[in-house]
Image: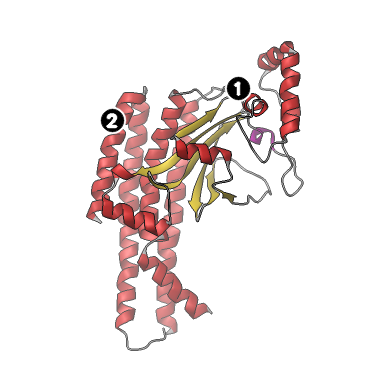
Amino acid sequence: MNSFTQSIEKWQSELKKFIINNIVDSKFTKLVISENKDFQINYVLGAYKRHKDLENYLLHLDKQSNKKLSKAEFDELSKLYKDLESYHLRNISEIVHTNFDFILKYFGKRSRKYKPRTSIKIINDKKVSTIFRNYSIGIYQEIPEDIDDNFEFIHCRQRRTILFSDIPLAISTNKYENPRINKPAAIEYYNDLRSFPGKKILKKLISPTPDYAWRDCWLPYGTGELSQMNSCYKSTLVTSIVLFENNLEIEALKFLKNSRNNSWSKGILFGFLCFDHPEVNYFKRIKDENMAIFFADILCPFFVYFDLYGTISPVAINAQKLINSMNN
C-alpha cells in the first residue's frame, strides 16, 4: 500500500498549491484541512486495524482442516466483517456531514431564506446514486440514474465543474435538461417573466418568497407528492470527485480502475459533489467552482480508502462470500 500512500501525499501537496492559487480565505481553508487531516489519520488507522483483524481471521480459518465453519467461527467472522462495514459507514458519514457544515459556513447568509442543498452521488456500475445529502426528501425513494443519461454528469466528465446560474433561461435556450422538469411549462414560465420585465424585478425585490409558478414546472415524484419548494432549484453547481491519472502510481491506478470497472480515460471517477439553490445567480462562477473542487478533493481520499479497505478489498469480498454461503 506504499504506492497509495505516496500518491495521496502527492495529491495533498497539489491540493495545497491549488488553495494558495485559488482560495482567498486561508483561515477557513486551513481549518477545513486541519479537521480533515485528523479525520483521515483516525479513519485510515481504524479501517486498517479492522481490515487486518478480518484478514488474519480468514487466514486462521483457511488453516483449519474443517471445510465447514462452526457456529462460533461463523459468528466471529460475521462480527469482524460487520465491525469493518459499520466502521466505514459511520466514519464516512461523519466526515461527509462535517464537510457539509463547512460548506454551509462558506456560503454564510448569501440567501435570506434558503440554504444551498448539497449532496454526494457515487458511481456504481455506471449507475449514479445519492448516498449523502444535507436535506430531507420526504417519503420519495430516489431511483439510481444512468451516468450517460444525466445532462450534468455528461458535461461534468468533459470538464471538472458545470454551473448553471439561471436554469429557466438555460432550458428556454436548449442548454439545460432535467427529466424532473416539464420543459414546455418551464419555457412558458421564462417567457412570462421576459414578457413582463417588471415581474422579474418584483421577484428580486420580494425574493425569496415561494415561487409556486416555478414549482408547478417540476413533475411530481413517483409517489404523486409535489416537489418541496427548496428542491425546485434555479441554480446548480456540480463537480467531479476524481483521482486524475497523473496523481497515482500506474500499478495503483490499474488496481483501483479495474476493480471499479471505471472506463473513464482521465483517471478514476468516484462520483459527484452537487449543489443547488432555488434562486437564480446564487452560485458565483470561478470562486464557487474553486470551492467545489476544493471540497471534492478534500473528500476524495476518504472514498479511496473506503474502496481499498471495503468495497473492492479482496479480504472484505471473500469474507462476505463466505458469510453468504453459510446463510444460504
Q: Identify the residue at image location x=71%, y=33%.
A: 183
Q: Identify the residue at image location x=48%, y=23%.
A: 285
Q: Quadrant of residue 280?
A: top right
Q: Which residues are magenta?
A: 228-232
SS category of the residue bearing label 1: loop
Considering every residue shown, the one lying at the far bottom of the view is 65
| Horizontal side of residue 79 vs 176, given as left or right | left
Q: Quadrant of residue 177?
A: top right
The three-letter amino acid code for the residue at tag 2 is Lys
Query: Residue 112 — which label?
Result: 1
Residue 272 seen in render: yes
Q: Position of residue 318 (x, y in %)?
A: 40, 71
Q: Which residue is mark 2?
A: 17
Residue 211 seen in render: no
Residue 230 falls within the magenta-colored stretch: yes
Front one among 12 and 238: 238
**Which sits earlier in the primary sequence, circle 1 or circle 2?**
2
Q: Is residue 41 above or below residue 190?
A: below
Viewport quadrant of the N terminus: bottom left
Front one among 170 and 198: 170
Q: CA distance from mark 1 to mark 2?
A: 34 Å
Query: Residue 165 — which label?
Result: none
Q: Position of residue 54 (x, y in %)?
A: 35, 69
Contact, mark 1 vs mark 2 (Cβ under 8 Å): no
Q: Is residue 221 above or below residue 309?
A: above
Front one among 93 and 153: 153
Q: Is residue 135 above or below residue 74?
A: above
Q: Is residue 163 above or below residue 66?
A: above
Our reading of the magenta stretch's main secondary structure is helix
Q: Position of residue 128 (x, y in %)?
A: 54, 49
| Horizontal side of residue 230 vs 185, given as left or right | left
